[in-house]
Image: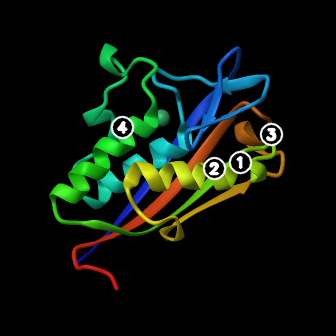
Amino acid sequence: MIRLGIGYDIHRLKKGRSLILGGVSIPYEYGLEGHSDADVLTHAIIDAIIGALGKGDIGLHFPDTDPRFKDVRSLDLLKEVALWMKKEGFILNNLDSIIVCQKPKLMPYIPEMRRNISEAIGADERRINIKAKTKEGLESVGKGEAIESYATVTLIKEKLR
Ligand code: MG
């Protein structure tokens, strides 16, 4: 059995916040605004897995009105969602994702993001792909006001070779 999931998220950039993407702390004068650590990549991935499991969305399970999730590490939420996946007998077949970000350059941080996501899900790094793109200066993301992210996953029930 194969399940497909899609996730999307966007967070505003704000002075004085830490920039956390895929669990990596990236030096930059702006960071993402949010109730949790605002890790927009990890949020898109969480939503893709929740979607593939047919369990609604991230806001349903981890509401931003709940003080338990204040400043929470999003990788820990991903770990929890990966447990639900395993409980239902699924494993991650593959994950593809995009971070759309005008600045800073993310390329040097992608290997560490990939490692973090792989560890949180408990899936081989080769099943995980992360891409970074700019918005060519267009719209809010291109003007450096926000960072957005897209993710797709496929989950499978049978064991892989
Ligand atoms: Mg979010």
Gap in angstroms between the C-alphas marked 2 and 3: 16 Å
User: Pointers 1 and 2 in contact (CB under 8 A)?
Assistant: yes
Ranked by sequence position, the earlier of labels 2 and 3 is 3
Q: Residue at x 61, y 43 (%)?
A: 148
Q: Residue at x 31, y 51 (%)?
A: 82
Residue 125 point in image, percent of width and height: 52, 64
Occupied quadrant, residue 63: top left
Q: Residues within 10 Å of mark 3 (few under 14, many from 20)?
A: few
Ranked by sequence position, the earlier of labels 3 and 1 is 3
Q: Secondary structure at mark 3?
A: loop
User: Pointers 4 and 1 in contact (CB under 8 A)?
Assistant: no
Residue 103 point in image, percent of width and height: 80, 40
Amino acid type at image mark 2 = Glu
* Residue under label 2: 112
Q: Which color scheme did the rendering employ for the protein?
A: rainbow
Residue 27 point in image, percent of width and height: 76, 30
Gap in angstroms between the C-alphas marked 1 and 2: 6 Å
Mark identifier at residue 56: none
Which quarter of the figure is the C terminus placed in?
bottom left
Q: Residue at x 38, y 48 (%)?
A: 47
User: Pointers 3 and 4 in contact (CB under 8 A)?
Assistant: no
Q: Residues within 10 Å of mark 2 (few under 14, many from 20)?
A: some
Gap in angstroms between the C-alphas marked 4 and 1: 21 Å
* Residue under label 3: 104
Pair 3/4: label in front = 4
* Residue under label 4: 77
